[in-house]
Image (cartoon, rainbow, N blue to C red):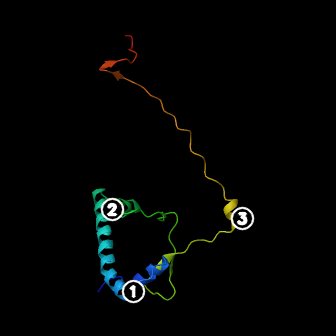
Amino acid sequence: MSVFTPVSIQAIAQSINVKLADEAAKALAPDVEYRLREIIQDSLKFARHSCRTKLTTNDVISALRLRNVEAVFGGMGQRDPARFVKATGHPDVYFVEDRTLTIKEAVYFPLPKAPAEPTILPHWLFIEGCSHAPRRMQ
């Protein structure tokens, strides 16, 4: 028995506007579980190799990068705990509800600080095996 039911696979497919047949959902459920177990095991390896017992989002991102999977953006930090909401009609599906912004809030939201100007300072110590740096007088 798979942890992911075909109903939850169909709910996820519907959330991204994909029509999925019952047979396809039944076939995808074990594969989704297998892929998820792989990612979790790899991320646990990253945590273990870092001498940590706590799994972080960076471990999961590293595991996804190891498998050549696109990184997931919007992971919650410790300061902003995720508030999961149960999907109506699907008892196994949870999601993070986004806050609704008005146009006024979006327009008058303060902009982030601009990054500093990039500066490059070239410094050649050795050119063709000779040091051209000024020598100290002793």
Say what amino acid the circle numbered 2 marks: Ala
Q: CA distance from mark 3 to mark 1?
A: 42 Å
- Mark 3: which secondary structure? helix
* Amino acid at the residue labelled 3: Lys
Residue 64 in the image: x percent, y percent? 35, 63
Rendered position, 119 above or below 14: above
Q: Residue at x 37, y 23 (%)?
A: 125
Give the Cα separation between the discs numbered 3 and 2.
40 Å
Question: Label 1: how many residues lie within 10 Å, few (<14), some (14-19) or many (20+)?
Answer: few
Of tags 3 and 1, which is closer to the observer? 1
How far across and down, in percent of the image, does residue 77 sit? 48, 63
Task: Name the residue carrying label 1.
Answer: 21
**Which residue position holds label 3?**
104
Q: Circle 1 sits in a helix, a strand or a loop, which is it? A: loop
Q: As drawn, is 113 to the left or to the right of 135? A: right
Q: Position of residue 121 (x, y in %)?
A: 47, 29
